[in-house]
Image: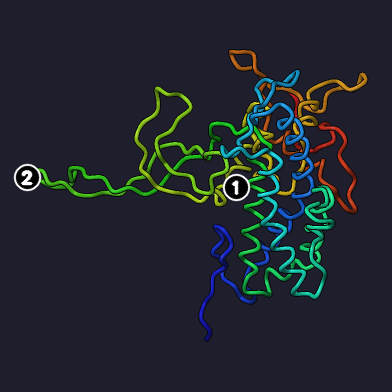
């Protein structure tokens, strides 16, 4: 019998029967690659606005409840330079895979120092990688490519999105050993170690791959010491989808989590914020279920996930055009 190999994909650990990457991780990387052209176009809009304003500062758009904040490096680079630096990793891997199959490299330099625009380079790079997506399973360097494209998407989102402080990631429930008196012991008190579970709630930092039980809570009065256990964020995805479905949450918070909850979803904030509005006399696609004491509307997570999935291309299925068409939707 041969040695048992595990998939090196981030947070996977599945047993490999063949190849160097499991099919699930390859499919996840394929979705990530498909995200990159749209993210690059959003970066172009962000870079044009912020480079014009100078200093990488954001601005408040009409109707937005919070300002846009963009993290950039503090070394004098423009946002465009930061985006090009992030995408350089994608270009390097594309040239590497293209050379493996005897294809031409990306035209990064055409006339001297003139580089083709990103809206041409990124789709070309993504198309090359998608044509040879099985290379990630068949080649020893395939897992490195899967991690590289995930890193590129994460860094692009840091430039585009407004990073929230933290997002909820469920209970910790890590096993703990605590010392306590033995209830079955007669005579002198004897202390024994017993196992219990950590009762702290976890909150994921934006863009972090690992969630640490550090005692953070949105309410400063409830913050305290956590157990220090670390959880891979990817292992929380299934739990998050199940828990968010019936939760009533702010629309912006749900949208910011769609890239985790609905892999491959490319819906932008401008589209999402129109869902609760009437459109030419038609009823809104999304209904608020309640309001917070401050008057902020809260929406059922399952309704938002259904609409987000409806924005993704489908084959052989009728597109759902209204929330009322979904069998599990309800309005209160």
- Outermost right residue: 280
Residue at position x 68%, y 40% from top?
A: 258
Q: Residue furthest left?
A: 188
Which residue is nearer to you in this view: 314 or 64?
64
Residue 326 % position (x, y): 81, 37
Residues 170 and 10: in front is: 10
Q: Tell me residue 247's x, y (percent).
A: 62, 31
Residue 317 is tagged as none
Kindly report the distance in space between the C-alpha atoms of the residues bearing marks 1 and 2. 50 Å
- Left or right: 315 as drawn, with respect to 240: right
In the rendered view, tell whether residue 145 sits above or below residue 294: below
Categorize mark 1 by other alpha carbons within 10 Å: few (<14), some (14-19), many (20+).
some
N-terminal of the pair, mark 1 or mark 2, is: 2
Is residue 214 positioned above or below 286 on the image? Answer: below
Residue furthest out toward the front: 112
- Using the rendered view, name the quadrant where residue 278 is placed: top right
For mark 1, give the secondary structure.
helix
Residue that label 1 marks: 237
Left or right, residue 128 beside residue 151:
right
The residue beneath circle 2 is 187
Q: Residue at x 50, y 37 (%)?
A: 203
Q: Nearer the viewer, mark 1 or mark 2?
A: 1
The residue shown at (37%, 38%) is 226
- Residue 197 lies left or right of residue 47; in this view the side is left
């Amino acid at each position: 019998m041969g040695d048992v190999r595990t998939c090196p994909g981030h947070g996977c650990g599945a047993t490999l029967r063949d190849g160097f990457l499991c099919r699930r991780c390859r499919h996840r990387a394929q979705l990530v690659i498909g995200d990159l052209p749209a993210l690059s176009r959003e970066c172009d809009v962000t870079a044009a606005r912020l480079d014009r304003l100078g200093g990488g500062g954001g601005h408040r758009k009409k109707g937005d409840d919070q300002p846009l904040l963009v993290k950039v490096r503090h070394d004098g680079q423009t946002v465009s330079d930061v985006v090009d630096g992030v995408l350089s990793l994608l270009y390097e891997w594309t040239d590497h895979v293209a050379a493996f199959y005897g294809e031409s490299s990306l035209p990064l330099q055409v006339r001297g120092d003139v580089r083709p625009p990103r809206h041409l380079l990124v789709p070309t790079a993504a198309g090359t990688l998608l044509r040879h997506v099985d290379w990630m399973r068949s080649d020893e360097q395939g897992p490195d490519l899967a991690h590289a494209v995930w890193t590129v998407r994460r860094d692009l989102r840091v430039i585009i999105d407004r990073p929230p402080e933290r997002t909820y990631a469920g209970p910790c429930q890590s096993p703990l050993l605590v010392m306590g008196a033995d209830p079955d012991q007669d005579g002198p008190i004897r202390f024994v170690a017993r196992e219990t579970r950590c009762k702290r709630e976890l909150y994921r930092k934006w863009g972090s791959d690992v969630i640490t039980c550090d005692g953070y809570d949105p309410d400063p009065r409830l913050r305290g010491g956590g157990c220090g256990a670390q959880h891979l964020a990817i292992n929380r995805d299934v739990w998050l989808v199940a828990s968010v479905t019936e939760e009533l949450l702010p629309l912006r918070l749900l949208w910011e989590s769609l890239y985790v909850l609905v892999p491959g979803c490319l819906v932008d904030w401008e589209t999402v914020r129109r869902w609760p509005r009437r459109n030419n006399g038609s009823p809104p696609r999304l209904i608020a279920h309640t309001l917070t004491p401050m008057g902020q509307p809260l929406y059922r997570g399952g309704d938002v996930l259904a609409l987000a999935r409806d924005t993704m291309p489908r084959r052989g299925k009728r597109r759902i055009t209204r929330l009322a068409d979904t069998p599990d939707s309800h309005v209160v």
